[in-house]
């Protein structure tokens, strides 16, 4: 018999990944995450980060991180419910609540921890969670951790959602409807006004995970709820501090009651160390910058519009995105990966996304535009995308 420590079963699984062509290694970035990056030792235009507003490497944000470290140290030292709760954590929550135009905010260590911790804390046995089929993995995990029953509606299909609610509402105490605010693979926005109508008609709770809407949609990046002016109608409004805000962390915005409960039952708050001072200082500065000026979001949308128009003119299928997320839909999986590989060889990094992340036959490369890209960089990227597309007979 094999030595158990050889992990033979994992080696077999890894071999299966290799056989089916989905095994990969991680690219290594040797500098900051900017509009251009040093990837595996080569300078390339970066069309794959979530650093929508260029805040991840902004001078003001970096300085704020450094001064927080000087005053508060490198680590928070404990979970928030013991002694890890510093005045800067409290101030950040007040500022975020103000920014989001909601009563209260609870900050978590990541968007992932926020979903995993919040969903299980606010639902239980006797409740039903109804989730969009394309919701993020961290929502799926949060739902799994809950003792509530689960149902899934077809992507953004409000008639299907209402059908499920109508059939099941009376069998449950609470019904929670969950959706992403912006869907990360296609860049489409959830139909929140219709969803809120259904929720009100049948007395359901609503939960929006706005990871890709935070810092992107709404006034100065206040998010999808603000975009539709639905303040007070979404019970749990989740945002990430890791994408457009440029640092790390997640939060839920909503009522004071929500906050009181999560401070007692949100497991990542009780059992995982508080965000480090550097992150809190940096996030606070990023949010301050967004509240002061729309220059970052204006630049982002200007760049996205320019890039999308140019790609569409070249004859690419860029799908139905309503946000700066710009898919170039290729279809065939192997061709998608070849396109992505050739783009990198020519100086543009755009990740290829294929089944099972997107349905079979809808392989795409997903371009993430940021406010940091100059027109010169965008033009250069577009030229490369045009040339490689012609070489591969995609356009
Ligand atoms: C990225 C993402 C998350 C996770 O956020 P992190 O802060 O990176 O952990 C959660 N939900 C959605 C919809 C996301 O796109």
Image: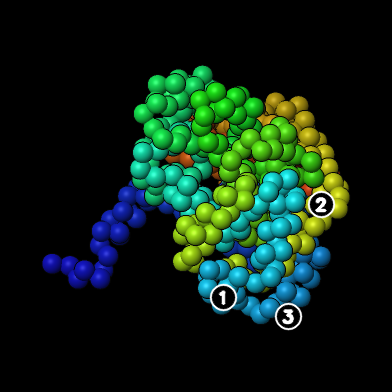
Which mark is first along the chain, 1 or 3?
Answer: 3
Residue drawn at x 36%, y 29% is 171
Q: Residues within 10 Å of mark 3 (few under 14, many from 20)?
A: few
Residue drawn at x 62%, y 51% is 256
Left or right position of 323 against 334: right
Quarter of the image that includes the C terminus: top right
Are the two marked residues, 3 and 2, in contact with CB atoms closer than 8 angstroms?
no
Are the two marked residues, 3 and 1, in contact with CB atoms closer than 8 angstroms?
no
Give the alpha-carbon distance from disc 1 to disc 2, as whole Å: 30 Å
The residue under label 3 is: 70
Which mark is first along the chain, 2 or 3?
Answer: 3
Quarter of the image that includes the N terminus: bottom left
- Give the structural element (helix, strand or loop) at label 1: helix
Which mark is first along the chain, 2 or 1?
Answer: 1
Q: Residues within 10 Å of mark 2 (few under 14, many from 20)?
A: some
The answer to whether residue 147 is seen in the rendering is: yes
Give the alpha-carbon distance from disc 3 to disc 2, as whole Å: 25 Å
Q: How many marks?
A: 3
The picture places residue 166, in percent across and down from the top left corner, at 44, 21
Taking depth in this image into account, of 14 and 69 the one nearest to the observer is 69
- Give the structural element (helix, strand or loop) at label 2: helix
The residue under label 1 is: 83
Q: Is residue 124 above or below residue 363?
A: below
User: Residue 284, located in which quarter of the rendered image?
Assistant: bottom right
Taking depth in this image into account, of 371 and 109 the one nearest to the observer is 109
Mark seen at residue 291: 2
Q: Residues within 10 Å of mark 1 (few under 14, many from 20)?
A: few
């Amino acid at each position: 018999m094999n030595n158990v420590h050889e992990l033979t079963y994992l080696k077999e699984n890894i071999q299966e990944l290799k056989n089916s062509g989905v095994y990969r290694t991680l690219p290594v970035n040797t500098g900051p995450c900017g509009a251009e990056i040093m990837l595996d030792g080569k300078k390339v235009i970066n069309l794959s980060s979530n650093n929508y507003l260029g805040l991840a490497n902004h001078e003001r944000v970096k300085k704020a991180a450094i001064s927080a470290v000087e005053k508060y140290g490198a680590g928070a030292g404990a979970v928030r419910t013991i002694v890890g709760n510093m005045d800067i954590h409290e101030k950040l929550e007040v500022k975020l609540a103000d920014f989001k135009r909601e009563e209260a905010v609870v900050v978590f260590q990541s968007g992932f921890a926020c979903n995993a911790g919040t969903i299980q804390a606010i639902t239980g046995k006797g409740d039903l969670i109804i989730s969009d089929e394309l919701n993020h993995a961290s929502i799926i995990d949060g739902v799994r951790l809950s003792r509530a029953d689960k149902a899934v509606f077809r992507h953004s299909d409000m008639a299907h959602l209402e059908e499920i609610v109508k059939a099941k509402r009376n069998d449950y105490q609470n019904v929670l409807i969950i959706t992403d605010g912006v869907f990360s693979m296609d860049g489409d926005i959830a139909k929140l006004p219709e969803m809120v109508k259904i929720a009100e008609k049948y007395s359901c709770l609503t939960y929006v995970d706005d990871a890709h809407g935070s810092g992107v949609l709404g006034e100065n990046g206040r998010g999808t709820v603000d975009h539709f002016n639905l303040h007070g109608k979404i019970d749990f409004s989740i945002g990430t501090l890791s994408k457009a805000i440029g640092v790390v962390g997640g939060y839920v915005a909503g009522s004071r009651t929500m906050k009181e409960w999560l401070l007692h039952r949100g497991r990542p708050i009780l059992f995982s160390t508080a965000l480090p001072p550097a992150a809190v200082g940096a996030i606070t500065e990023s949010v301050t910058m967004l509240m002061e000026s729309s220059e970052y979001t204006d630049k982002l949308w200007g760049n996205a519009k320019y890039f999308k128009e140019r790609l569409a003119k070249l004859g690419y299928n860029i799908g139905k995105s309503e946000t700066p997320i710009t898919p170039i839909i290729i279809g065939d999986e192997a061709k998608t990966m070849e396109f992505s590989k050739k783009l990198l060889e020519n100086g543009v990094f755009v990740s290829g996304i294929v089944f099972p992340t997107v349905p079979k036959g809808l392989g795409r490369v997903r371009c993430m535009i940021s406010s940091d890209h100059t027109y010169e960089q965008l033009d250069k990227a577009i030229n490369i995308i045009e040339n490689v597309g012609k070489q591969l007979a995609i356009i």
